[in-house]
Amino acid sequence: MPINYYIVLALALFSIGIVGVLTRRNAIIVFMCIELMLNSVNLLLVAFSKMQPAKEAAMTVAGTDGQLFVFFIMVVAAAEVSVGLAIIVMMYRNIHSVDINFLNRLKH
């Protein structure tokens, strides 16, 4: 399968994520859109790593570097979700809403 298909799909997923982050006010939906953007980057990393030729003749798996980056991105995304959801739960306990506009109260 040509890499152009992967690029178009990743671009569409990333665009949907950006539109969701910029237009939505619900914190949970914003986190889901951020995860969508991270997954589109993961898709591109895996696609590009599979297109990379093997460095040595003994290697049977081509391009594992991109797959390692994907693994680390998934670990960081899991940590981000756990911390983000903890913040959302505490915000809901105090404010009884998950609207991002209420976070402006924390400035003062």
Image (cartoon, rainbow, N blue to C red):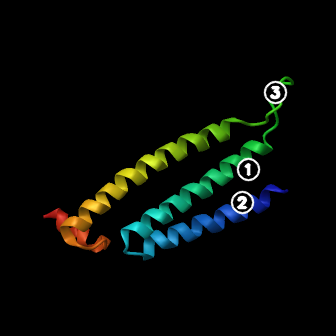
69 or 32: nearer the eye?
A: 32
Quadrant in which the N terminus is drawn: bottom right
Q: Are marks 2 and 3 in contact (CB under 8 Å)?
A: no
Q: Identify the mark nearer the N-term, 3 or 1.
A: 1
Q: Is 65 above or below relative to 93?
A: above
Camera-side mark, 1 or 2: 1
At x 44% / y 72%, what residue is drawn? 22
Q: Amino acid at mark 2?
A: Ile
Q: Quadrant of residue 23?
A: bottom left
91 or 100: nearer the eye?
A: 91
Quadrant in which the C terminus is drawn: bottom left
94 sits to left or right of 16: left
Q: Are marks 3 and 1 in contact (CB under 8 Å)?
A: no
Q: Regarding mark 1 in the picture, which secondary structure is present there?
A: helix
Pinpoint residue 44: horizontal percent, then vertical percent: 67, 52
At x 66% / y 41%, what residue is drawn? 67
Mark-to-mark CA distance, 2 and 3: 26 Å
Q: Are marks 1 and 2 in contact (CB under 8 Å)?
A: yes
11 or 73: nearer the eye?
A: 73
At x 55% / y 60%, what residue is drawn? 37
At x 79% / y 55%, what residue is drawn? 3
Q: Regarding mark 2 in the picture, which secondary structure is present there?
A: helix
Q: Tell me the number on the disc at residue 7.
A: 2
Task: Looking at this view, name the residue that lies furthest to the left.
Answer: 108
105 sits to left or right of 7: left
Q: Tell me the number on the disc at residue 58.
A: none
Camera-side mark, 2 or 3: 3
59 sits to left or right of 90: right
Q: Residues within 10 Å of mark 1 (few under 14, many from 20)?
A: many
Pinpoint residue 34: horizontal percent, then vertical percent: 48, 61
Read off the residue under disc 3: 59
Q: Identify the mark nearer the N-term, 1 or 2.
A: 2
